[in-house]
Structures are given as structure tokens and as C-alpha cells.
Image (cartoon, rainbow, N blue to C red):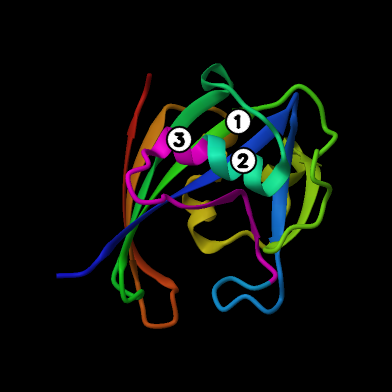
Amino acid sequence: MKTVIKSVTNFIYYKDEYLLLERNKNKKIDPNKINGVGGKLEKGENFIDAVIRETKEETGYIIKLQDITFSGIIDFEEGYPEEWITGFFRIKVSDKKIPLGNSTGDGQLFWVHKNKILNNKFNLVDDLNYCFKDIVKNNGVFFITLKLDSNFKIIKHNISKLRI
């Protein structure tokens, strides 16, 4: 039986702009690709506590429960030695000044208007091609299972959505 790793990916937004992370070129998985901020849940931690902690650790933003909207879950099967279950969240902030600055250990943070992301060919991490529009448009909640090959590329997907 595989170990299960739980993680969060947070999409911080101010008005119609989103704070994205361009991953460092030396990253083993998804180098130079665009993603939200986040990371693994710590032992005994739930998804919401991880959203708040990861947002603070990676950006310095202090957020509250009312700033968080749940967008969905992706279950990454195969490809990795572990099974990954990632919760996706939208995080509303009150200004664009990133408290810890634009540079993180994982890469560079930058703000971009949602239309540029939705209408452009940004080099997004592969899984975002299946859910980013739903996250930005706050289009209900998604539940996705992705099957990956040994190079971490998506070879099969199953998507269900709930309107809330």
C-alpha cells in the first residue's frame, strides 16, 4: 500500500489579479512551471490549518477563515512513489504588497490579471490545465483523479464537479 501525502495549493487573489509562483529551474518536478503557493500538511494538521500556515510561510499574508474558499481536490494516482491528495483553495487578500517579497525558496512570485492567465498559454503545472478555470471563476467544487506516468505526465483523468 502506498503512503498518502496530503498537500494544499493556494491561489491568492486581490480583485481580479492572482499571485502565482514560477517554480525554480532546479526543481525536480515542474521546474519553471507556474503554480499557486502551498505545500504538505504537517502531522496532525488539517487542510484549513495548512492553507493558513503555508500562505503565511510562503508570502507573509495573515489570512482568516472568511478569506478562504474551497475549490476542489485532486488525487494523483501512480507516477509518484506516493499517492498525493491535494486540496485547492482561493485566498482573498486586501492588497498586492507581498509581505515577504517576491522571492521564495521555491521560486518567484508575481501578480497577473485573471484574463491573462485564462486566455494565455502560461506554462502552468499540468494539473492546473484541468481545474484553473474553475478556481478563477469560482465555478463550484471539483473532484479530479489523475493517473500519471513515470515522468509525472498525466495520462488519464476523471473529473466530477458540484455546483454550490
* Secondary element at image label 1: strand
Q: Where residue 73 sits in the image (x, y, percent)?
A: 37, 43
User: Which is nearer the eye, 78 or 56?
Assistant: 56
Q: Is residue 122 visible?
A: no
Q: Where residue 141 sits in the image (x, y, percent)?
A: 39, 31
Provide the residue span drawn in magenta.
32-51
Q: Foreground mark, 1 or 3?
A: 3
From the viewer's perspective, tell me whether residue 155 is left or right of residue 108.
left
Q: Quadrant of the N terminus?
A: bottom left
On whether residue 114 falls in the magenta region, the answer is: no
Residue at image location 53% in from the left, 53% down from the top: 128
Circles 1 and 2 in contact, beta carbons < 8 Å: yes
Residue at image location 58% in from the left, 71% down from the top: 30
Residue 110's mark? none
Q: Where residue 140 sits in the image (x, y, percent)?
A: 42, 27
Q: Which residue is mark 3?
A: 49
Under mark 3, the amino acid is Asp
Above or below 95: residue 78: below
Place residue 95 in its image quadrant: top right
Q: Which residue is mark 2?
A: 55
On whether residue 34 falls in the magenta region, the answer is: yes
Instruction: State how far apart marks 3 and 2 are (Cα).
Output: 10 Å
From the viewer's perspective, tell me whether residue 47 is left or right of residue 94.
left
Under mark 2, the amino acid is Thr
Q: Which residue is mark 1?
A: 91
Instruction: State how far apart marks 1 and 3 are (Cα).
Output: 13 Å
Under mark 1, the amino acid is Ile
